[in-house]
Image (cartoon, rainbow, N blue to C red):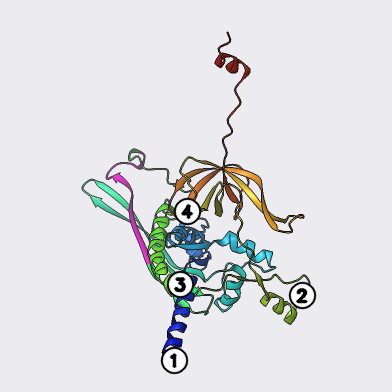
């Protein structure tokens, strides 16, 4: 009986450890997709370079967040690596998955490639009209690599194909009479052979991101989570070789996250004058709200020797869209960076003027 009891206790402890581990969301690092396979074709067709590898990564981001994942985007990856004296590379080396998992504190790294990109243009005569159609086809492959095991858990490939009508011309009329758009430029500024195709390519990429995101999220339960209570210490200046490796492998207790007063969210991504942020657990934020952006810094209280976090105002944003897992806002002033905190703006009531005070008191 004692052996059965011991086995039962051991199983219970193991199950409870798994349950405790599963209480936090999956953390993943999202790299831009490699577009070297299609770079020349993009320039040939559109007349200029376009960062479709970054665009599909941006489209994939909300799919992963909606799958209950905490996502570290390129800006955050670059900053974290720089802090630890590592150089960021657009192309991720799968053999370094375990090392990057410790450096970034993530359970998996997601990267991918654009395998092919085709733009076809055709015309169809319908009675006296000639319709022009554009078909954009994109093949994309993603890889989700476990940082705990180094194995590729998922490698979904999807073909996005979008067909749209570009315009209509009437047969037998001169081009000037047909009301055709100027052929030297196009929406999006394309000057290549397939002018105006950029929005259709983006639609095909969006289709790829939607399907790839679903398959990646389905694999989240199979990810082995790493221990986030241990972080890799940055190498000391000047260390090289085995000494540097030993410093990188040394572990220290993780610093607990300390929110600012009235904090309602944290900036995850910055793109020109717009940001994507993750709201706090009890935050009540809605579209139209104005939030203050503060840059947090931790200091030691000399009296108590305890760590405290202080914030310095660096900008203001206006919330434009709010979802359950993330929100988007427009930067109205200042300079915002990834990991900046969003704080609710306090409305301070103005003291009554002397005239209104006298009037309220009934003095004429």
Left or right relative to 93: residue 144: left
Label 3 or label 1, whichever lies nearer to me, is: 1
Label 3 or label 4, whichever lies nearer to me, is: 3
Query: Mark 1 or mark 3, which is nearer the start of the sequence?
Result: 1
* Mark 3 Cα-neighbour bin, 10 Å: few <14, some 14–19, many ≥20: few
- Which percent across, then down, holds residue 316? 59, 42
Residue at disc 4, secondary structure: loop
Q: CA distance from mark 3 to mark 1?
A: 24 Å
Extreme residue toward the front, this view: 1
Q: Residues at badges 1 and 2 in contact (C-beta under 8 Å)? A: no
Query: Mark 2 or mark 1, which is nearer the start of the sequence?
Result: 1
- In which quadrant is the C terminus drawn? top right
Query: Which region is colored magenta?
Result: 159-176
Q: Which mark is residue 343?
A: none
| Front position in the image: 75 or 234 | 234
Q: CA distance from mark 2 to mark 4?
A: 40 Å
Query: Mark 4 or mark 2, which is nearer the start of the sequence?
Result: 2
- Position of 168 relative to 69 (above/below): above
Query: Mark 2 or mark 3, which is nearer the start of the sequence?
Result: 3
Residue 162 colored in magenta in the image: yes
Label 2 or label 4, whichever lies nearer to me, is: 4
Residue for badge 1: 3
Residue for badge 4: 326
Residue for badge 2: 239
Label 1 or label 2, whichever lies nearer to me, is: 1
- Which percent across, then down, holds residue 248? 68, 75
Residue for badge 3: 19
- In which quadrant is the N terminus drawn? bottom left
Q: Main secondary structure of the magenta part?
A: strand
| Front position in the image: 215 or 223 | 223
């Amino acid at each position: 009986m004692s052996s059965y009891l011991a086995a039962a206790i051991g199983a219970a402890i193991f199950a409870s450890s798994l349950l405790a581990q599963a209480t936090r969301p999956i953390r993943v690092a999202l790299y831009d997709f490699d577009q070297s396979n299609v770079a020349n074709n993009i320039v040939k067709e559109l007349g200029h370079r376009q960062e479709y590898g970054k665009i599909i990564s941006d489209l994939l981001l909300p799919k992963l967040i909606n799958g209950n994942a905490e996502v570290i985007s390129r800006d955050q990856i670059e900053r974290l690596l720089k802090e630890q004296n590592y150089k960021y590379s657009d192309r991720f080396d799968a053999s370094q998955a375990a090392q990057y998992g410790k450096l970034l504190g993530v359970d998996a790294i997601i990267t991918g490639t654009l395998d092919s990109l085709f733009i076809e243009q055709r015309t169809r005569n319908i009675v006296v009209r000639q319709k022009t159609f554009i078909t954009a086809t994109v093949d994309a492959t993603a890889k989700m690599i476990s940082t705990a095991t180094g194995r590729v858990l998922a490698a979904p490939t999807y073909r996005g194909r979008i067909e749209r009508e570009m315009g209509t011309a009437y047969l037998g009329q001169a081009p000037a009479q047909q009301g055709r758009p100027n052929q030297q430029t196009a929406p999006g500024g394309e000057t290549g052979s397939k002018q105006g195709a950029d929005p259709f390519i983006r639609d095909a990429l969006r289709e790829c991101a939607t399907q790839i995101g679903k398959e990646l999220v389905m694999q989240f339960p199979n990810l082995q989570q790493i221990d986030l209570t241990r972080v890799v210490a940055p190498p000391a200046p000047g260390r090289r070789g085995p000494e540097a490796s030993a410093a990188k492998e040394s572990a220290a207790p993780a610093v607990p996250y300390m929110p600012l007063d009235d904090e309602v969210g944290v900036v995850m991504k910055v793109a020109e004058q717009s940001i994507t942020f993750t709201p706090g657990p009890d935050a009540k934020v809605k579209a139209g709200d104005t939030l203050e952006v503060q840059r947090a810094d931790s200091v030691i209280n000399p009296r108590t020797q305890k760590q405290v976090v202080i914030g310095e105002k660096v900008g203001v944003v206006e919330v434009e869209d709010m979802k359950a897992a993330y929100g988007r806002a427009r930067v109205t002033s200042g300079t915002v960076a990834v990991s900046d905190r969003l704080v609710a703006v306090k409305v301070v009531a103005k003291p009554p003027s002397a005239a209104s005070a006298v009037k309220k008191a009934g003095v004429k």
